[in-house]
Amino acid sequence: MDQIPFANQVERFSHTSGKCVQLLHMGPFAGELETLPVLQQFATANGLRKSGMNQEIHLVNFEKGQSQEHLQTILRDPVTVI
């Protein structure tokens, strides 16, 4: 594990937020504001409504000063049936 960068920082935990809608956002964090309405439109079109806080799962390690061009973030909203 010492040879894999950040391997000692990985933490396993269980998280249950129930039914969710999610999508993969690619690019800068600022672009998420344009992507989130797509997630909401999908939920509404499928008879769902947001029922909790937006969650983000960052798939690319990001450090201050790096370009955000290649970031990959899963945006997830917990939902309930309308």
Image (cartoon, rainbow, N blue to C red):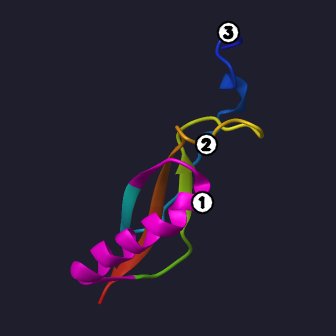
Q: x, y percentage for residue 25?
A: 45, 52
Q: Amino acid at mark 3?
A: Gln
Q: Which mark is residue 64?
A: none
Q: Nearer the viewer, residue 80 or 26?
A: 26
The residue carrying mark 3 is 3
Q: Looking at the picture, does residue 48 appear above or below residue 74? A: below
State the residue at coordinates (45%, 63%). 76
Residue type, label 1: Ala
Contact flag, marks 3 and 2 (Cβ < 8 Å) = no
Q: Position of residue 49 (x, y in %)?
A: 37, 84
Whether residue 14 is visible: no
* SS of the residue under disc 3: loop
Q: Residue at x 63, y 35 (%)?
A: 61
For residue 56, say whether it is visible. Answer: yes
Say whether residue 14 is left or right of residue 49.
Answer: right
CA neighbours of label 1 inside 10 A, class few (<14), some (14 to 19), many (20+): few
Mark 1 vs mark 3: give the one in front: 1
